[in-house]
Image: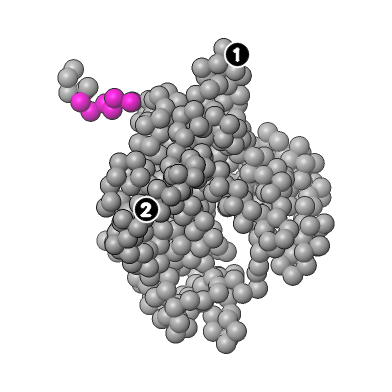
Amino acid sequence: MEWLKRIIPKQWLSALAILAFAISANTTINTEGTYDRWHSLVMYDQGGYYGYMPAFWIYEDLEFEFFKQFGFDTNSIMIAQEDGQKVNRYAIGPAVLNMPFFIIGHEIAKATEDHPAHGFSPIYKKSILIGCIFYVTLGLCFLRSILLRYYKDIVVALSILSLGVGSNLLYYTTIEGMMSHAYSFFLYSTLLWLTVKWIDDNKKLALLWIGLVMGLIACTRLPNLVVGLIPLLWGIKGKDDIRNRFELLWSQKFWIIGALALCVLGYAPQMIYYKMKVGRFFVDSYPQSRFWFDQPLPHRVLFSFRNGWLIYSPLMGMGLIGFFFIRKFCKDAFWPLLSFFIINLYVISSWWCWWYGGSFGMRALVETSALLSLTLAATIHVWIHHKYWRYLFVLIFPLLIGLNILQTHQSGNHIIRYDGMNWEAYKFVFGKTMPVTPEFIQERDSIIHYDFGFPRAATDKQYRYEKCR
């Protein structure tokens, strides 16, 4: 049996948890019929992210006119600039990461007669969803490596299960696997792993990779650059640490210059697209949108039934509780994580569309869960080792995992509506599974608050506060 011991990881529970996530993600895709609904790949946000791949690899069409031959228009993808030229409003980063899987799907399509090689047959969706699962699984592996530094294997395993099947990460890995958030989750996990390597292990080479990853983060979702606070503040616990950090940065100034160069390289695909399309490297792809920084709505982002994070991913509440315990396990993480979370929540909740349109839960916080894995694990450790709280944990943990799987099913089948949900509608659909009747959906819609004039929130702050609840 020696050969078996060699192939089984020493901390096998956390490795098994990652495997459980990968199996759950693949099962979700198949049982929810995601492969059969390939048309969702070319609609709205997902179409914008996905469209770069066939545009560059197959059609050489930066106008995205090829969408029309499949019965889809580009009005939801292309946005006009002041000079009248149009650009894809969605970031190119997810396409850059998933291009290898797209190419594999394209080559399979060319080699068989079952799938037309035009970029929109089911094999392409299968390929990119496999790519999405790959990146999230790899991100969980990075998190596992970090968490095992501070926590026991059982705690790490439960934390990974919480993220992978207990939050809306599962939904954005499977049912909407071409949105940016699962890829940002991977990049956040990678950044955290590299930060620990750079600061704790004194690996200067990790600093260069940090620069590249930051560039890819910007290329995937520009507001996520606030995550740069993590490597900047990691390990800072007091005033002396601030001075030491400046000394470290100065002593490694040439490495930092290299990191900045690689950051530009990571963002280069976006700049190249803009340059090819409109002749300049930087473009405002959301010219009719804005942040209301004087009216953040964090309570709604977290608790509203209109896509509130803790309503649809309640297990992540343990990640917030963990801020009270994290210093016991990883002092280096407290201030960077707290600073990032507060500033990031402020930025997210200041966006004019604070509920982020069609979503399952607060999709803008999916990637944040990667960083909160440290605080989540702190709560789990405290609870499972407490004389009484361990029984509470044993009770609520499987219930909340089951709730997330149920609500993922409901959202994927539009039982939970993508927008406009409220407490009455949530009660009405609670526990319902497919199939549901058209009459059921009509009755649900009759009690949903949905304002089709919500784009007014981009120009009217009072309207955003009073009407968009």
Residue 257 on image: x %, y %: 33, 64
Residue 433 on image: x %, y %: 64, 37
Could you say which quadrant of the image residue 201 lies in? top left
Residue 432 in the image: above or below residue 49: above
Q: Residue at x 27, y 52 (%)?
A: 205
Badge 1 vs badge 2, beta-carbon distance below 8 Å:
no
In terms of secondary structure, where does tag 2 sit? helix
Residue identified by numbered label 1: 388
In terms of secondary structure, where does tag 1 sit? loop
Residue 3 in the image: above or below residue 446: above
Q: What stretch is highlighted in magenta?
A: 6-12
Could you say which quadrant of the image residue 423 lies in? top right
Q: Residue at x 59, y 52 (%)?
A: 343
Q: In which quarter of the image is the N terminus?
A: top left
Name the residue furthest top: 387
Residue 441 can be seen, yes or no: no
Density class for disc 2 (Cα within 10 Å; few <14, some 14-19, many ≥20) is few
Density class for disc 1 (Cα within 10 Å; few <14, some 14-19, many ≥20) is few
Name the residue furthest bottom: 83
> Is 10 included in the stretch rendered in magenta?
yes
Residue 247 shows which numbered tag?
A: 2
